[in-house]
Image (spheres, grey):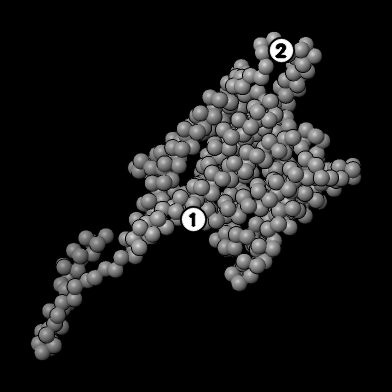
Amino acid sequence: MASQKMWGGLMNSVKPYLAMISMQFGYAGMYIITMVSLKHGMNHYVLAVYRHAIATAVIAPFALFHERKIRPKMTFRIFLQIALLGFIEPVLDQNLYYVGMTYTSATFASATANVLPAITFVLAIIFRLESVNFKKVRSIAKVVGTVITVSGALLMTLYKGPIIDFIRFGGGGGGSSDGASHSGASAAALDKHWIPGTLMLLGRTFGWAGFFILQSFTLKKYPAELSLTTLICLMGTLEGTAVSLVTVRDLSAWKIGFDSNLFAAAYSGVICSGVAYYVQGVVMRERGPVFVATFNPLCVVITAALGVVVLSESIHLGSVIGTLFIIVGLYTVVWGKGKDKRMTDDDENCKGLPIKTPVKQVDTGKGLAGELEMKPKEGQETKATQVEI
């Protein structure tokens, strides 16, 4: 019996880590799949709309069935928060991400997201979701880790460096002159749009961090993760459709068949919108938004490997060095967050312990003398109060 309780407690403590690690594998697949779809001519506005329409259709039945008895009452303030959530991430963030990724690369797009924990940490401090005490080692670790993370992101953004070939296909002189000229033209096009693409990706990261903070506040008033996920995806679909009808004048862009474009919309919608919003909501209620954001460095490692193998992308030295800085910094933050969690649990356990105060027995037969004996003197009362403070 004791071993079962120990095993159950271990699984409960490991679940948030497993959930967030699994999400990074899902995000890594999305970076590659959507990149292929965009290269095949899929419009990024239309892709975002189809993505959240599919996510709404898949998640809505689960929300209606599993949360029919616990779904809170909808208020106007909660509706406005959900509408804002539906615009920030499904519309603004994802379109900035799609355009920024086409201007740079799938690996670089996932790498810039590594600054997300640092931005989320700063916003969490501003909105009092996180506290910092420089007398505590765990707080210093969170701050130092944030600084290292930002430094790595800036290094990766401002310095490209030489190309590093981790995987070489074929022999040394196998490339043709046509292939070399095509590669040079592609590299020149990427260099031309590298700065605008980087700014779009960083703007997307700021919006993503704001989405985490607002989702954390909304869950406190509307603690139904499946229903909240469905409503965010629904609002994202409606708002994205309105934006797309204004920006996309060619109606043929809305045509979609059973091809890679449909697969990209379905995969990113179900895994990276529906499941991801739900999982991060569940974990966020227990561990906070900073914990959710700290696992993004795993995604860049997975995406870099897939980008080299699937898309034949090049990895630059600046990206490698910056990623190493980011990983070290972010896991310093994770260590500090782990210490915060243990201290919070200990405080809650201490508050739950009953406090027994010995009661002095008074002989009622003494009458007035017994009552006088129970009253403390003024000096004693002042002294006790001072010790208690």
Amino acid type at mark 1: Glu
Give the x, y percent position of residue 45: 78, 43
Horizontally, residue 264 falls left or right of residue 9, namely right
Which is nearer the eye, 219 or 182? 182
The quadrant of the rendering that contains the C terminus is bottom left
Residue 129 visible, this orientation: no
Q: Which residue is mark 2?
A: 174
Image location of residue 167, percent across then percent down: 61, 22
Residue 90 in percent (x, y) is at 70, 48
Q: Which residue is mark 1?
A: 286
Residue 102 placement: quadrant: top right
Residue 4 vertical position relative to residue 299 in the rendered view, above or below: below
Whether residues under marks 2 and 1 lie with C-beta atoms below 8 angstroms apart, the answer is no
- As helix, strand or loop, the secondary structure at mark 2 comes to loop
Q: At which x and y percent is residue 127?
A: 52, 51
Q: Residue at x 59, y 35 (%)?
A: 302
Residue 74 — which label? none
Q: Residue at x 42, y 57 (%)?
A: 8
Image quadrant in which you'd find residue 138: top left
C-alpha separation, residue under disc 2 versus residue under disc 1: 55 Å
Q: Nearer the viewer, mark 2 or mark 1?
A: 2
In the drawing, does residue 59 fall left or right of residue 139?
Answer: right
| Residue 279 appears in the picture as rendered | yes
> Which residue is located at x 63 percent, y 60 percent?
226
Quadrant containing the N terminus is: bottom left
Identified by mark 2, the residue type is Gly
Residue 167 drawn above or below residue 37: above
